[in-house]
Every structure is written in structure tokens, then in C-alpha cells.
Image: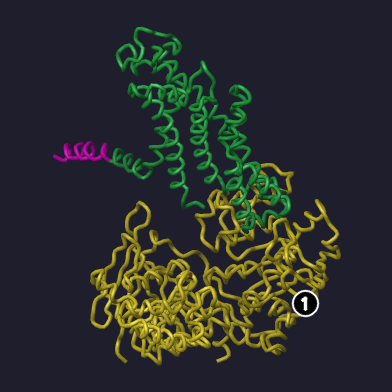
Chain colours: A green, B yellow
Amino acid sequence: MSEHAIPTATSAGMPAAPLARWLGWIGQRSTLVAGLTITAVILFVGFIAPFLYPADPYAIHPAHALEGPSAAFPLGTDELGRDELALLLSGGFATLVVALPAAILAFVVGVAYGLAAGLAPAWLDRLMMRILDAVLALPSLIILIFFASLVTLDNTSLILLLGLISWPGLARLVRNEALAQRGRDFVLAAEQLGAGRMYIARVHLLRVMAPVLVVNGTFMVGDSVFALSSLSFLGLGVQPPQVSWGSLLESALDIIALDPWWLILPPGLLVFGSLLAASLTGQGLLQRWGGHR
Amino acid sequence: MNIVLDIRDLSVSLRRGRAGNVAILDDFNLTVKAGEMMALVGESGSGKTIAGLSIMRLLPKGAKLDGQILLGGRDLATLDEAAMRRVRGRDVGMVFQNPLAALNPSRTVASQIQESWMVHNGGSLRAARARALELLGEVGIPEPAKRLDDYPHQFSGGMRQRVMIAMSLACSPKLLIADEPTTGLDPLIARQIMALIARLRREHDMGVLFVTHDLSVVEEHADAIHVLYAGRSVEWGGAKGFFAHPRHPYSEALLGSVARVGQTRLQNIPGNLPEPESRPPGCRFAPRCGYAKPPCEAAYPPALSGEGTAAACLYPLPAGHRGQDTAMLQGKTKRNFAAQLEVQDLTVRYAGQSGWFGGAAKLPPSLSDVAFTLGRGECLGVVGESGSGKSTLGRAVLQMIPYEGHVLLDGEDFAGKRGAPRRLQRRRIQVVFQDPRESMNPRLSIGDVIAEPLRLKGGIGRAEERRQVAMLLGRVGLNPEMAVRMPGAVSGGQAQRIAIARALAAEPELIVLDEPTSSLDVSTQAMLLNLLKDLAVEAGLSYILISHDFAVVSYMADRIAVLNAWRIVEMNDTEKLIQAPQHSYTAALIGAAPQLHRTTR
């Protein structure tokens, strides 16, 4: 009797426990898990899917123009008869390859500028903040439109422009945080030990600010995708013949009267998904780190 | 006298982590009579705060409560939430440690006192306002009619606590629970608040449950006392008998670790308080007790009552017993010191509101014309109430803030120095702050924190660094294995030892101790002060000890400077200052500090 009782007890009890614990783990981090999942989907669409679906995005099939989803064209075709799924994947790569480096550039500039201002003598800090106010006062999308109308922008200049326009928000945040942390006892103690500004920034400030930085970094990626898509939607971002999510939306808008939902919904969802992914990931990280400040 | 509160066999367990519920308080019995002040004494982790919150049924979610809490014949332990709401504030008033956090900053004090009256009594606003006025006068707020419509931030710390007390008295409760109401106040103010609560309990025939970690606070006014250790009662009974003759070794040790004016050595209680998960089955104090015998570890000892108090101890201390702490005001041998630090005409002004591009307005000084000389190996105590400029003095000596005047270390003026020579000279003066947790970066390990001075100096490898960190941890009485822990996982006393180890790692000649023990439990404070004393001798260190606690300063310092309103009003050798204070403020400070009652009685 007892020989049987023991194995049944373990086989019934053991597998359930890890599953319950796994579900509990996910439940506590639902926001973060959702954010990371959508992020993975977006990255997959942008960087891996183009290799798995090698159809030529620029091949024209006039006989099949503006058809809905079918076996041959999973997401249908546009008014020229191009494969919408192939366009979407190609456009995804074109969007991310600009938006991600731009976000990284803005992040690095923002953190460096903010830390420098936060650790600078009061007069220099004041000057740097006035410069920052001036940059913030410029309407960034209008600036982008202005430059884009003067010259045709290649990817590099798009990255530079996008990056150099979106750093001030983070810079202000980092500066304020640096000022607040700078007066804390452990920073004063380090200064008493002879620590210089670079050491304080590297060892103390960056570490205590890490949650704030990571969270805002994720937001910046989302914003960058959105800004580039807005620009492309206006015809000023990624230049034809290369498509992007924004320009796909724009061309679909021309024929919106024909109700081509397969041309509007997928790129719209992807732009929306990028924002959502960044926002959820950031929120999730914030929740996890909430108690560690 | 009739009994107001009768707690019978109360046990409380709280949810801690994944482990489920852990017992925090066991078999707790306590009665408070009308007009009586009952002091519930224990250090952090003793369960005293949980006991107080249990009465109000304000325990955190997931808490389990067993036993009876009888208030005027009703059992609060089983009351439903709606009925409980009517008890809170009406039958039981509560005063907390931090009145600024307990008062709403955006509402006038009158409206907050009126609120607690009207919630329970209804009635007109006019009547409530009259009641508020009456209460403010009763708690000793001068010109109460003028202060009714002031906001909490317009009151000083002591006055705010009076407002809190007025609020808790609004409905004439039968029981007042005061949870560390004087902690964080200046000693002179704390004494006034104590006297106020003592007076009110008589006038209103109200029972007071006074929760505190500091025995010296309640020495003067408590009628009865109840000492908790690690969730169990260790000794209880009349206060007079208790202070004259504590019978439990823990009570005796706790009394012995209170710094008193004129004391030469504080009692150390070796070891740490056990975590709630790992409390020993027998007497919980046995592992740290100097009198413990094998039977102590078998089962929790039964209460033995003698004259005065009852103690849960198999071997209670006999009457007339004197612990190792009883020291007389014996002459400290006058030592001679070679001059090390010279402070001349030190004045500090903090910059006021600044304009758009600078041009800060100068405010009145925060420290004015301070001058003294500190000898090598000497400990200078700096006492004064909050706002007297004592921390400013420390920060100026540390070169953390700009100042007028001169600070010379071994004859070398800081004023003329820039760059590396200044940094090196500054490094010779180190600092230990009040809040040990704030003084460590929460994202660095303990090992990293202590290694910081070594890394900044440079020139040693990883292995040597680890060896030195282990050595430093040993010097401050900590286990070298602690190096891998994070600051969040150590106790306050341990954290302060780590801060001292970091200061030592820089091989300083002088350490500025800015209220190093005022956030710690009494017994932890005693051990830390003893450690600092030993280190000074061992390493030839000089100290500037800044504190609002005169007893602590007098215990440590060779010489004391009394700061009042940004100036040194009196400075003298510790003994001479105690025996013949010249300034009335000094005399008041000494009077407010715990005295060596037991030997002088």
C-alpha cells in the first residue's frame, strides 16, 4: 500500500508546484512580461522575419493589384500589386535601423549632458540648463521637417537629426536626479575621501540612477520609432523607393476610400506596438525596481 | 483604580516573505489602569510597536491575532471593522513619533482637531472649534486663539507634537497610546512633552500606554513598566521597584547601556537580537546573558514575582545587585594633547535664494565666530539643539561647505590649497553620519563600500584589497563574511560599524562623528560608543562628536563645547562643565540628561 502511496503523491504534487510558481512569477511581472513579449515580436518582424519570408517587396504584380489577403499574398497587395507582407518586413527593418541608433544617440547625449550639468559648478549648470531650455523650446518635428525639406536625408543624417533633437528631456531628468543624489551622505563621504567628479558620476550617480535611466531609455526607443514614422508619414523620413511603416500608412491613406484594411491595420499596429512595448517594458521595470531607491 | 485596558494572552504573527506567518509577539499580558502611565519598553524587534498597533487593530495585512484585548469590557480583538472605527479616536487616542507625518500639511490645525471631534460627536462646527481652542490651551500652546488657523509647518517640532496630543485628546479617550512621542525631539523639548503627558493623564484620569525603546525617557514619570525582549515579556511591575532594582538580566543590561552624565563605561550586551524565525525555545535572552545556566535553554522560564516586579527568569538578580556598569563620577585623568586642529573665527553663511544668473543673497550666519583648538587624540564634544549650528560646524571642518575664517590641520591652512594637496589634506579628516543607511550607496556591496577609500588611493591589488576589507570588518567587530552583503540586508548598528570601517580605511587622524548613535537602539548605541572609544586609543584618533544628547557627549568627550544660537556659549573640560556650568543653557542641558540615579540614590 505504502509503496504505491508515495509515488502517486509525488507525481500528483510535484509537476503542479513549478507550474504554479511559474504562473505566479509571471503574474507578479505581467506588465514586464507583456512589454518584453511585444518587444520580441517587433524585433523579430524587423530583423529576422525578412530572412524567413524572402519575397521581393518591389516586385510588381499588376494582375493582383489591391487584393486582400490570400495564400499567395498573406497580407494582400497594394495598389501597384506589391506584396504587402514583404513591404511591411522591409519597412520594419528600415524603420528600426534608424530609430534604434537614434534613440541610443539621444540616450547617450542626454545622460552625459545631464550628468555634466548636475556635477558642474552652479554657474555652468545654470548656463547649460538655459541652453537646454532653448533646445526644448524648438518644436522638434517642425525642425525635422525644415531640414528634410532642404536636403534629402540619408539614414545617417536621419539618425543624427532624430538623436540630437530628442535628448533634452532625459538630460533634464538626469541633471535633476544628479543634483538630488549629489547631496546624499554617501556621495559626501566619497568626496571626503578625495573622489573626483568622474568617479562620483561613474560609481555612485550612475548606479543609483540605473532604474530611472533604463526606464526612460525604453521610453525613448518607443518615441523614436513614433517620430520616424510620423516623419515618414509626411514623406520626409525614409526616402522612396525604400518604404517604412510610416510611408506605408501614408500611401494607404491615399486610397482609404477603397477600404484597404490590410494596408492600414498592419503598419499601424506595428507603430502602436512599438510604443506599447516600450511603455510596458518601462513600466514593468519601474515596478520591479520601485522598492530599491 | 479601575482597569482601562486588559490584554490577555495576546499573540500576533505577521506575514514575512514566502515562509508564511511568523510569530512576532507571544503570550503578552498587560493591564493599564485609569490615570496610570504604563511604559512598554523594548528595542527594535521586541514587538512593542506591534503590541500598540494590535490594540488599535492597525496591523498589516495578513496578520493573525489571538487572545483578548479588553477595553471597558469589550474585546477589541473580535470587534468588526465598523465598530473598531468608532473605538479609534473616541475610546483610544494615539500619538505617533513623527507629528509632521501624522498631520495633514495642507489643513489648519483647528480643522484637524475639529475633525476628530465631529467624526465621533457630531454637533456644530462652532462647538468643535470651541473644543479645539480649549484643547490647544490645555496642551500648552501659547496664545491658542491666534494659532487655531495656522498650518502644521508653522509650528516647531515640540509644538507640533502638542497639537498631535490635542488631537488625540479631542474625544477624551480612556486610553492614550503614545508610540515614541519624544524620539527625535531635542532633550529639553522631550522633557516638556513627557511632563505634559504625565500631567494630562492625572487631570483626565486617562490610562497611558507609553511605547519606547529608551528607559531613561520614562524613568521620571512612569507608574508601571513592562519590558519586552524578542516578542516575550521579560519583566513587569511597578516602575519605582524596577528602576531601584531590576531583576531580569536583560532589564539590568538595558539600564546599564543608557548613557548617563558622568559614566565611565557603558555596558555591552554581546551578540544580536534573534530574528523572529530563529528565536531560541528557552529564555530568548539566554544566548546573550552573562548569568545564563543550562536550564535557561530548556523552556521559556515562568514568571517569578518578588517585591516590586515579576521577572520571567530562573535566576533573577538579588536585591542590591550591582552590575558592571555602576561607575562613579571619578576624575578622568587630565590628559595633555599636542595641538592638531585649529579653528579660527569660523563663520558660515548659507546662500539665500539665487537670481537668474547667480547673485545669491547672503543670509544671516548659521555659525558665528567659532574658535577652538583640538589636540591629537582628544575628543571634543559639540552639543546643542537642532538648528544651533552644530552640524554646520562639522561640515565646515570637513571642508564640505564654504566658510569664512580658517581651519588649520597640523598648522596647514585649508584656505590656500587647491587640487591634489587639498584633497590629500581633506582625506585626513573623515566623517561618520547620523543615518547609517544614507551613508552607503544602496547598490554597492558592503565590501565595495569599505574598499572605496582603498580604491581611491589606489596601488593595491584585488587580493590585498579583500584582505584589508576583512581586517577592517574585524576591527569594528563584524564578521568578514559580511563583505558580500548589500546595505539593505544589515541592521542599523551593523551599518554604522561599516561606516566607521570605511572611515578607518582612509587612515584618518580626525573623525567628525555627526550624531553617530542617535538613530540606534540604546544597547546598540552603548556598544558603538564603546567601540569608538577603543578605536581612538588603538589608532590614536581624535574625534569631534556632534550630538544633541548631553549624556552621550559627556561619556565620550574630554572637552565639551555648548552651541546655542550659532555660537559657542561655553567650552570647558567635561568634568568642570558638569560640576560648574557657567551658562544657564548648559545647566538646563545637563539637567535634562539621564543622571546616575542608582549610585547617587
Residue A3 counted in the magenta span: yes
Residue B225, position in %: x, y? 41, 82
Residue B83 falls in image quadrant: bottom left
Task: State the SS at label 1.
Answer: loop
Main secondary structure along the magenta-highlighted residues? helix
Q: Amino acid at mark 1?
A: Arg
The quarter of the picture where the C terminus of chain B appears is bottom right
Horizontally, residue A61 falls left or right of residue B549, namely: left
Q: Residue furthest left?
A: A1
Query: Which image quarter is the N terminus of chain B in?
Result: bottom left
Q: Position of residue B472 (x, y in %)?
A: 64, 55
Start and end of the magenta stretch?
A1-16
Residue A85 sits above or below residue B183 on the image: above
B390 and B599: which one is in front? B390
Q: Is residue B501 visible?
A: yes
Residue A164 location, x and y as percent?
62, 35
Q: Residue at x 37, y 24 (%)?
A: A256
Q: Chain of mark 1?
A: B
Report crowding for label 1: few under 14, some 14 to 19, many 20 or more residues within 10 A (C-alpha): few
B127 relative to A291, above or below: below
Q: Is residue B301 left or right of residue B364?
A: left
Q: Is residue A190 magenta?
A: no
Judging by the rendered image, the residue that carries numbered circle 1 is B335
Q: Compared with residue A98, is residue B598 higher up or lower down, i.e. above or below?
A: below
Residue drawn at x 36%, y 87% is B206
